[in-house]
Amino acid sequence: MKAKHQRLTLVVVAAVALIGAVLLAMQGLRSQAAYFYQPAALLKADVPPGQPIRLGGLVLPGSIAKAADGVTTRFSVSDGKATVPVTYRGIVPDLFVEGSGVVATGRLDAGGVFVADNLLAKHDENYVPRELGNIDREAVISESETLIK
């Protein structure tokens, strides 16, 4: 076989191996991906229960409630258009307060409640996660006042 053909064969084999490795990596990462949703988008999306996702929004004022076990926290996350109830079992971050931005990683249960495995809270009063930059804080606060009445 000529040297030119050997090089061409080697390049083709390397390209096929590289494409195969990329496809395997994409398949493996697909099962680990957690898509980000805001409450309104989550309610419109057809997310099957148990699929890992991230939910972001503002903690609805007046919605934080601790369960009797002292470890379970229930609250609602809103984007001003929709609200999703959340349950988190664990120690909440120190900066987790009503009206603050939060990104929760977890999954929806069969009843439509988001069961969070991890919470990420803001770090100061001006911080809003990049994904939540378009949420109107005033709309969320007025929504919470409407729900309280």
Image (cartoon, helix red, strand yellow):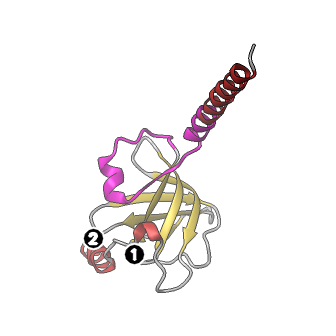
Dot 1 amino acid type: Gly
Q: Position of residue 5 (x, y in %)?
A: 69, 19
Instruction: Give the vertical position of 93 relative to 127 (above or below).
Output: above
Using the rendered image of the protein, determine whether residue 30 is visible from the camera's viewpoint. Answer: yes
Q: Which residue is mark 2?
A: 147
Label 1: which secondary element: loop
Q: Is residue 106 left or right of residue 80?
A: right
Range shown magenta: 23-51
Q: Which residue is mark 1?
A: 62
Q: Position of residue 43 (x, y in %)?
A: 32, 51
Res 139 → quadrant: bottom left
Q: Residue furthest bottom?
A: 125
Q: Residue furthest top?
A: 1
Q: Is residue 38 magenta?
A: yes
Q: Is residue 105 magenta?
A: no
Q: Nearer the viewer, residue 98 or 2?
A: 2
Q: Residue at x 29, y 48 (%)?
A: 44
Give neighbour class at mark 1: few <14, some 14-19, many 20+ (Cα, 10 Å): some
Dot 2 amino acid type: Leu
Q: Residue at x 75, y 22 (%)?
A: 3
Label 2: which secondary element: helix
Using the rendered image of the protein, determine whether residue 64 is visible from the camera's viewpoint. Answer: no
Q: Position of residue 40 (x, y in %)?
A: 31, 57
**Disc 1 and disc 2 in contact, CB within 8 angstroms:** yes
Q: Residue at x 70, y 23 (%)?
A: 4
Tell me which numbered mark, 1 or 2, is placed earlier along the sequence.
1
Quarter of the image with the C terminus is: bottom left
Quarter of the image with the N terminus is: top right
Q: Position of residue 39 (x, y in %)?
A: 36, 58
Q: Residue at x 62, y 66 (%)?
A: 70
